[in-house]
Amino acid sequence: MGFVNRYSKFIPYLYFIAVISYWFTDVNRTEGLIAFPILLLGIPFLWQIIMPNRNLNFTLGTVFVCLSSYLILAYLGHILNLANFSTLQKMGLFGGFFILFHFIMAIWIIRNSLKRSF
């Protein structure tokens, strides 16, 4: 149980690194070299794992909660047919799970910055 408690604070960062890695490989297959700036998005999350910083942690959490809230509103708009977004036509049940996990991980980052000292 001590192992889980000790390393549970790294789960949201590993989640976002995995999402960025998947996004990079998907774009790299179709676009090529244009995809490499996507890897720069993973640097703050990797930095939080190596050398944690409370201010960076709170900033990452706040930014991603805002982005997740926007994604939730867009997804609900798509489900309720309030707006017709062509990119959201491809979203299904897995898109909803992705948005939900994205929001939960962003809240977890904020919780880490408020409750725990690194």
Image (spheres, rainbow, N blue to C red):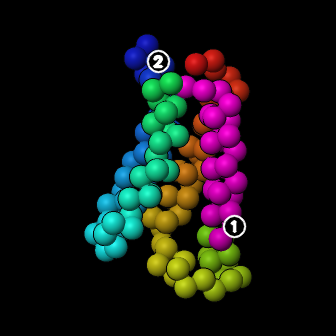
Residue 84 location (% of width, % of height): 63, 86
Q: CA separation, marks 1 and 2?
A: 34 Å
| 1 and 2 marks in contact (CB < 8 Å) | no
User: Where is 92 relative to 86, above or below?
Assistant: above
Residue shown at the point (45%, 36%) measured from the top left: 46
Question: Quick check: 91 left or right of 115?
Answer: left
Q: Is residue 79 magenta?
A: no
Amino acid carrying mark 2 in the image: Arg
Q: Quadrant of residue 37?
A: bottom left
Do we see residue 111 in this rendering?
no
Under tag 1, what secondary structure?
Answer: helix
Please tell me in which quadrant of the rendered image residue 22 appears. Answer: bottom left
Question: In this image, 63 relative to 12: left or right?
Answer: right
Residue at x-position 37% and y-position 52%: 21
Q: Position of residue 105 (x, y in %)?
A: 56, 43
Q: Which residues are magenta?
A: 52-74
Specify whether 75 is left or right of 14.
right
- Check the image and report above or below for 48 versus 22: above
Q: Dividing the image into 4 quarters, which one contains the N terminus? A: top left
Q: How many marks?
A: 2
Of the numbered discs in the image, which one, if any, rests on residue 73? 1
Of residues 78 and 46, the one drawn nearer to the viewer in this rendering = 46
Please, what is the dominant secondary structure of the magenta stretch? helix
Quadrant of the rendering where the C terminus is positioned: top right
Is residue 55 shown in magenta? yes
Q: What amino acid is labelled 1 in the image?
A: Leu
Q: Earlier in the sequence, mark 1 or mark 2?
A: 2
In this rendering, the answer to whether 80 lies above or below 93 is below
Q: Position of residue 58 (x, y in %)?
A: 68, 35
Residue under the image location 44 percent in, 57 percent down: 38
